[in-house]
Structure formats: C-alpha cells, structure tokens
Amino acid sequence: MFYLFIIVMIAFAIVLTRFYLLKKEIKRTTRQLHQFNQNQTSKKIDINFNDRHFEELAKEINNQIDLTKQAEAVKRSTENELKQAISHISHDIRTPMTSILGYIQFLESDEVSPGLKKEYIATIKNSAGRLKVLLEDFFELSIIEQTEYPMKMERVRFNDLIVEALLGFYEEFNKRKIEPEMHIPDNDVMAMADASAVKRVVENLVVNAIRYSMGNVAICLEERDEAVQLRISNTVDKLSEQDVHHMFDRFYKADQTRTGKGTGLGLPIGKSLMEKMNGKISADLKGNRLTMVCEWNSVRTPTQ
C-alpha cells in the first residue's frame, strides 16, 4: 500500500510539474504574441516545451503570422501602386488641361489674328482629344480590374477574329507605309475566350506596334501544345530590358517618354483582360525586335 502511495505521489508530481511547465510556456508564448502584435518584434513564435499538440499550435500560429505579413506586403504594394497611378494620371491630366487653358487665354485677346485663332482652336481640340482618351482608358482599366467584371467565355475561332481586328488598321498601316507580315493558318484555330476582349487585346497590341515600329510589323497565329498563341512583333529603337520588364505597368510609357503618343494604359488593359480570360501575356526583346506573346487555352475541333 505504501509503494502504491509513493507511485501515485510521483505521478502526481510529474503531472503537476508538466502542468506548471505548460502554463509557463503558454505565458511565454502569449508574451511573444503580444510583442509581435505591438510591432516590438517581427520574430515568429518559438517554444521550449516538448509537446506535440503545443508544437502544432505554435506551427499554426506561425503560419498565420506568415499570412499576415504577406497580406500587409500586398496591401503596401497596392497602396503604393494606387499612389503612383494617382500621381501619374494627375500629371497627364494637368498637361493637356494647362495647354487648353493657356490657348483659351490667347483666344480671349483681341490682338490674335483669325489665322492664329484657327491654329489655337486646333491645338485645343488636340489637347481635349488626348484628355478624353486618357480618361476613357483609365475608366476602362478600373472597370476591367473589378472582381465582378463580366466575361463571356466561349469557343472562339481566332482566324476570323484576328483578321477582322487587323482590317480596322488598314488605313493606319497604309499611312505609315507599313506592310505587315501575316501568318494566319487556314485551318480553324479555336480557344476558350471572350471574343470582344480578344479583339480589344489585339487592337491595343497593334496600336502599340504601329506607334513604336521602326517600319516592320509581323503577326503570327498558331497552336502550340494545348495553347493558341498570338505573336505580334515589331522593330524598335532605344528600348531596354528594363522597359520590357515594366511594359505592363500603368502609365509606364506616358511617364517615361512624355511624347503625348499614348496614355500608357493600353498594355495594362490588355494584361488585365488576358488575366480575366485565364490567359497569359508577355513581352520579349531580342536585339531591336520586340515581340508581344498572348496565349489562350486551345479547343481542338473534331476534325483535328
């Protein structure tokens, strides 16, 4: 009986000691969490108590800390991007607006000749047109990037769609004396996509190619593995790898060149539309040739 009492007391002492150590570790962990929440440390939770369940709890807490850090990083990045977008659009709005207001003041003068008035009015119209395009592009991009932006995903025959989009640029190609190289197969090239979104993407890429081309534009449509790939390439001048890396950033072109040729939103709009269609878009620079590559999930026809 005495030995049983001794065994019970030893077991009780072990349990009591373990309970004491567990309580001590809980206090230590609570203190670490408090320090983390008060931004006194960025260190994860570490434990000294050897217990499988407590170790799993600490692991889950550390996972939550990682998720919190990631969410904060995304939030900071989004806030910085928004600040930059506001800064850029303010600059781009201010430029044509200043021009418009300045020439209106000139027109109010009685000393301005009819010839100059006509010239000033033309300048005002041009600046107003640039302002209109900028605001429309910015509004379109903000709408596209909304989570609930509707996409009508269906089987799309890319052959006809690409040709239809390119025909709208016939006069522009002709005016710039550019004869595009077109490689579009006769057999059906099908993919799951939104037809209107595809057309918008193609139009934005062609506009970019024509605007910055040094005289040569090539369009190639083909099926590769399980994807439909569209490549639009053109020769360029003074384009760096850094430019290519930031090409799909909002306002990048307008911010860097300030030539008034574009808003810097055409490629970001194209990227957003591609992502909405679960597609991919990228840019590649080899020598003085820039290639835009779009990919959609292909849908093979029964005859293929």
Image (cartoon, rainbow, N blue to C red):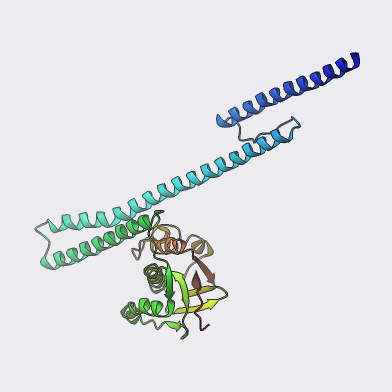
Residue at coordinates 17% horizontally, 56% vertically from top-left? 104
| Nearest the eye: 141 or 248 | 141
* Residue farthest bottom in this picture: 186
Q: Is residue 255 left or right of residue 94?
A: right
Q: Is residue 8 left or right of residue 203?
A: right
Residue at coordinates 21% horizontally, 61% vertically from top-left? 124
Q: Quadrant of the rendered structure where residue 64 is? A: top right
Q: Quarter of the image containing the N terminus?
A: top right
Residue 262: x percent and y percent? 35, 64
* Residue farthest top in this picture: 2
Residue 60: x percent and y percent? 63, 39
- Position of residue 36 relative to residue 139, above or below, is above
Residue at coordinates 76% horizontally, 19% vertically from top-left? 16
| Nearest the eye: 278 or 34 | 278
Residue 19 visible in image? yes
The tally of labels here is 0
Residue 11: x percent and y percent? 82, 21
Residue 214 visible in image? no
Q: Is residue 45 left or right of residue 211?
A: right
